[in-house]
Amino acid sequence: MRHKSLAEFGVAVELAEPHAPVVLFDKVCLAFDEKVILQDVTFDVRAGHTKIFLGASGAGKSTILKLMLGLLKPDSGTIWVLGHRVDQLTETQMMGVRHHMGMVFQEGALFDSFTVGENVGYKLYEETTLPLAEVRQRVEEVLGFVGLGEHIDKQPSELSGGQRRRVAIARAMAAKPTLLLYDEPTTGLDPITSLTIDAEIIKLRDLEAVTSVIVTHQLRDAFYVATHAASREGVGEAEIVKAADSKLSEADFVMLKDGSVHFEGSADELRRSTDPYMQTFLS
Amino acid sequence: MRGARQASAIRWLKRSLLEVQEYTRLCMAAMQGTVSRPFYARDVMEQIEVIGLGSLTVVVLTGFFTGAVLALQSGMTLDQFGARPFVGRLISASMIKELGPVLTALMLAGRVGSGIAAELGSMMVTEQISALRALGTDPIRKLVVPRVLAGFIMCPILTVVANAVGLAGGWLIALTQLRVPSGVYWTSVVEGLYIQDVWMGLIKPFFLGFVIVTIGCHVGLRTSGGTQGVGRSTTNAVVAASVVVLIVDFFLSRLLISILF
């Protein structure tokens, strides 16, 4: 079933509304010269939910994230993000929308001339008027959240691949975004480090109420994020546990094939799919 | 066969026009960025240090040896007319009007243009530019504007330094090799200069500095294709900036001659 689009609502969505769609793609098409990247892509992402995009390399997964961020513009179709029609916004107008978004890039994309602390606090240092002491406090807080508090003064080149990804997550969450986009957050990492990253994604979603859009082809990580939840009692360490049934329905999978949506459904529906392409992908 | 050649020519023409269009847009955005907020003053100061102070050694060496070799070569020619005492006049006119601005600009094209293209190119291929945009920062304002301002400000200053050192280099050779007394040399330097020459030597570097930095930024920001692409961009930036410096210098000289003289 296709959800009612924000365009059809005719007004900017109230983000406080429970499970309001924070992202909506409506018949989005994009091509570079002759090559079709996305063809009639339609989906939505509800507030506090997780949307996981799967697909082979070149299927258009990362392009979807770039369209959400306004780094690319579609050839046709409409894109609503956080109540704004981003396909029509100028770069300057987009800056306001991006203020509420965070993105974790595939290789981290950390600024190599800055320290870990400067990377994490970049947005707060440069784009806000927060006093330096408060910025430093927030940087320490988010680095503590991803377990890298002691690395604040190091250069990104001194960190391992997994640590760099966690710094990228810390940087993306530092300004308290409501929507976080992850581009292949665990690709190229060993299984144990991948689980650490997965745990950070789950913690952010469940403890900080951040809507998550994840692009990956690591099925194990995708299912782990979809089927687990984070809980914390008091001020103790957060615990990752199996998600309750009600929580399972908040994670959706979208399978892209040749730039089109081939499948959309829950983790359980994905596992039970008898479609030959899905079977090949899952095997 | 002919059709394929035509199609290829049309593709090349389209690509060239696109480059010109994108370069013009970058220049306009950079100029707009200098007069509107947000303005990253700390980055401007950083770039003034990198572009200005960082290039001082190479500019001083270039200026000094250019002035020295000019004195050496022109001394021999002037001897044929018994005009050796006028060596200062020749050096001041050549250095201040033409060689100072152009050689400084060429040195900056090599050192600064390549550095900017490599730095921004690396940031492009490692998605740091996309990350900047995702974090709500306009890369033009954060990266291009500070470099353009630094190039615009520092190129004339470095040119003045190159001119001064060039005249000093010429004086050293005139004194030690050509046996021209210091007083004669410096009087000749001053007599050989007209205020129009000084204006020309001071106006040109503003444009040349702008051109070098904007080309470096433009080429850097259009980098693709990984580390190979960064290498390609660096080479392209130096070649394009050097050629454009000479072309702009010619047309600017032509224009300034018609205005000033």
Image (cartoon, coloured by chain):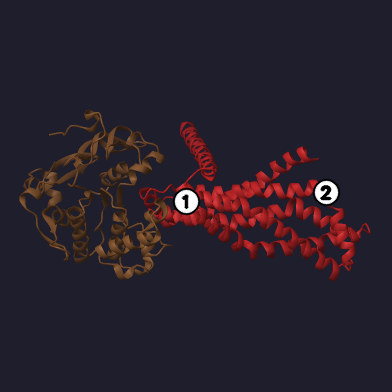
Judging by the rendered image, the residue that carries numbered circle 2 is: B194
Q: Nearer the viewer, residue B245 or A90?
A: A90
* Crowd rating for badge 1 (residues with CA inside 10 Å; few <14, some 14–19, many 20+): some
Q: What residue sits right under mark 1 in the picture? A: B142
Pointer 1 indicates a residue of which chain? B
Give me the residue at 36% from left, 50% from top: B135
User: What is chain B's hue in the picture?
Assistant: red
Give the residue type at disc 2. Tyr
Q: Which chain is brown?
A: A
Do marks 2 and 1 both belong to one polypeptide chain?
A: yes
Q: CA distance from mark 2 to mark 1?
A: 41 Å
Question: Considering the numbered disc 2 on the image, is that residue within a helix, a strand or a loop?
Answer: loop
Q: Which quadrant of the structure image shows residue A223?
A: bottom left
Q: Residues within 10 Å of mark 2 (few under 14, many from 20)?
A: few
Q: Are marks 2 and 1 in contact (CB under 8 Å)?
A: no
What element does badge 1 sit on? helix
Q: Is residue A71 visible?
A: no
Q: Amino acid at mark 1?
A: Lys
Of callouts 2 and 1, the N-terminal one: 1
Q: Is residue A70 left or right of residue B6?
A: left
